Amino acid sequence: MNGELFKHILVPHDFTKEADRALRMAATLATGARGDLTVLHVITPFYPLREVTRTGPGLLDPKELEARVLIRLEGHVASVLRSDAARCLVVTGNPGQRIVHAAADATCVVMPTSGRTGAAHTLIGSTAERVVRFSPTPVLVLPPLRLRGGIPPAIQSSRRR
């Protein structure tokens, strides 16, 4: 069963250390199952998309932005895995929805959670939580690394204030 579960792993990636950790874990699981990885980065849309050019501000084409981020993602994934074996995708949209949509083509999802609690969790919500609720495939969620007495980093920083 485990071999089939890790045959095609989707790894949502947001360029954080936690996402790198999930990527390494997914690569280990895929290698053991002779599976493959798809790394997905979702660009959350913001309006208007603008960039400053020589002629002044202009609209930034979302497809051009996706292409630029894809180049960055491919380089980053290759350096984390020390291989170019993973397939990389970049899309624009709501992260939770786009990850769930992409999960339909995977046998499982491996992703981190930031460990937000309290007001931050209530206001921002949890992409991992949405994916767990709506994914058509199993989801392995890696908790944040624990530091100093088992307290997640997000909680530690809020306690210092």
Image: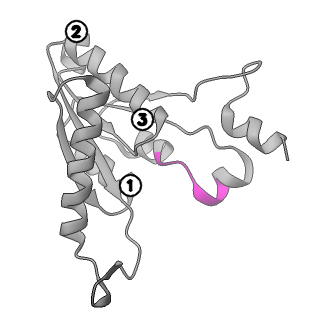
Residue depicted at x 22% and y 18% = 30
Residue 21 lies, in percent from the top left, at 43, 26
Q: Quadrant of residue 103?
A: top left
Q: Which residue is mark 3?
A: 19
Residue depicted at x 27% and y 77% = 60
Which numbered marker is on residue 95?
1
- Nearest-to-viewer mark from 3 and 2: 3
* Element marked by disc 3: helix
Q: Residue furthest front?
A: 54
Give amino acid for label 1. Pro
* In this rendering, position of residue 93 left or right of residue 67: right
Q: Which residue is mark 2?
A: 32
Give the magenta part as a residue range.
122-127
Q: Which quarter of the rendered picture does the N terminus lie within?
A: top left
Q: Is residue 99 magenta?
A: no
Q: Quadrant of residue 106?
A: top left
